[in-house]
Image (cartoon, grey):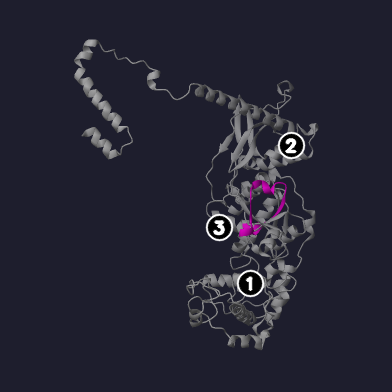
Amino acid sequence: MGVGGKFWDLLRPYGRHEGSDYLRDKRVAVDLSFWIIQHETAVKGLALKPHLRLTFFRTINLFSKYGAYPVFVVDGTPSPLKSQTRISRFYRSSGIDTTCSLQEGVSVERNKQFCEWVSECMELLKLLGIPVLKANGEAEALCAQLNSQGFVDACITPDSDAFLFGANCVIKAIKPNSTEPFECYHMSDIEAGLGLKRRHLIAISLLVGNDFDSGGVLGIGLDKALRIVRAFSEDEILQRLEDIGKGFKPAVSSGIKSVDDDGEESSSQMKRRLPHCSRCGHPGSKRTHFKSSCEHCTSDSGCIKKPLEFICECSFCSKDRVLKEQKKSENWWIKVCDKITLGPDFPNRKIIQLYLSDIFTEEGSSMSWGFPDTEMLVDCLVFNLHWDPCYVRKMLLPMLSTIYLRERARNNNNNNKGNPLLCDQYEFHSVKCMKTRYGHKSFVIRWRKPISTSGLTPEKPIVVWEEDEEEVVEEEDCVVDGLNEPQVQDDNGECFLLTDECIGLVQSAFPEETEHFLQEKKLRESKKKNVCEEGGAGSSSMGAQRSITDFYRSTKAAATPAENIDTGGSSVASASAEKKREASSSSFSKSVRRRLLFG
């Protein structure tokens, strides 16, 4: 998909690795067709209507965990050129003869099943309050133009031709259930690293193939295409390709002078080639150097033998190498131009027009994010996915809590403090703890039902202290995007809902409560640190580690003098053994110690 010839591999060194906070409070355009195809491939047969299930999960993840404002774009009627390429790909993959080409000007719609999936996903997204736009042609084209005109901050699409349509920032894919950062490509980094601009990339796609012409020019790969487009500026590259397609061979670029321009001077110099010594490689014959030492070899004993990779730096050899490089470059250009000329109607002006045309719709200027229609969402997912209504409401809670916190941060005043969260049932209670999941830190927030009796309602939220949690979760398949389900906590008969929320968003919505939580957390950590230091000081005051006999008295009775007399022989033996032990503990080798001990 996109530009052929492993185009992503060319761009990969210039991609950035961003974390989940990169998209926070940013508007992103998402190619919905890619999500549907990816989901269907990943979990086909494992779930009922996987396109709905995973679009629901991934949208809530993108909205709540990443904190982004997504805009979904769907494909319109495909171009006839795209239809021909798609059918030719199908023919090749199926082993069908491709000699009979599709009639020009015929536009082929997508299959009926896929259109139904797109329609169902669009209905689901509208119920979630997410804007959905329909492109006049390619979805990635509208995503790119929304990005280039400033309506969105980035595009999420795997199609590399988004840069050809004018995108400034492209995110290849996101992985919610992974600790790995996602790849983010900026056009400014590509221009700085490769020296290529938008029209250069269009020229590369014409040479190596794209979604509208999968073949490209026969015999030209990405390396050759890169060398060709770098020879011309952005303003002239497309016109130069058109001239080559018509049979005109451009002058060799990069300041290289043609060999033919040197005229008789170069040929006369070739005839007057100076002899070189076969031993040292310097100008002059071996016989001459034998009579008188070589002026380039700083030795009185004769010529110094040249190394294996010796290169003569005399004026003649240097110019000869330049002439050979010129000739080689000219021959390369002639062969490349001949290959381009053989291509029919190269370059295709319709493809260039598609990449440079503006298919922006007025809908993009009026994008707005609404509030989810909870009851309609419950009915939709119960009917299509056979989910329990309670499960739908629970999985929707992270999105609703994010909307609540955003509104609270936007209208941060005391009158808004007691507003309910979900269905007039839950309100913010306290910050439970800090949590780390997939390398992403967040607050665990307690939500509760407000108590009707005013005497029992505390005036200030209580900070409940518990150990900070860090979930170590094995990475799953990044396509199967499950949600971190809200938990229910029973605390002395009072039930709380627990959700994971962005730390910065909670700080903006409830600054006093968050500051109180962080101060208490800091105080608690300092107390724990002091306890550890006191324990360490107590152990260090005792000095080095003592023997176990220092703590336990020996129960052995002291020996009497008579016993000492009786054991006189044994004491002599023990003295001998003691000497052997002393010898064994010396710096002798192991074999010597063994002979000393055992004789």
Q: Nearer the viewer, mark 1 or mark 2?
A: 1
Magenta-colored span:
13-34
Q: Are marks 3 and 1 in contact (CB under 8 Å)?
A: no
> SS class of the residue under badge 2?
helix
Tell me which amino acid carries mark 1: Arg
The residue drawn where x is 48% and y is 77% is 279
Residue 353 in percent (x, y) is at 73, 71
Above or below: residue 299 compared with residue 445: below
Describe residue 235's horizontal placement relative to residue 18 as left or right. right
Q: Residue at label 1?
A: 227
Residue 270 in percent (x, y) is at 59, 86
Answer with mark 3 or mark 1, whichever residue precedes in sequence. Answer: 3
> SS class of the residue under badge 3?
helix
Q: Quadrant of residue 562?
A: top left
Q: Nearer the viewer, mark 3 or mark 1?
A: 1
Answer with mark 2 or mark 3, whichever residue precedes in sequence. Answer: 3
Q: Residue at label 3?
A: 41
Q: Residue at label 2?
A: 509
Residue 102 in percent (x, y) is at 62, 76
Local crowd size for mark 3, using a 10 Å CA cut-off: few (<14), some (14–19), many (≥20): few
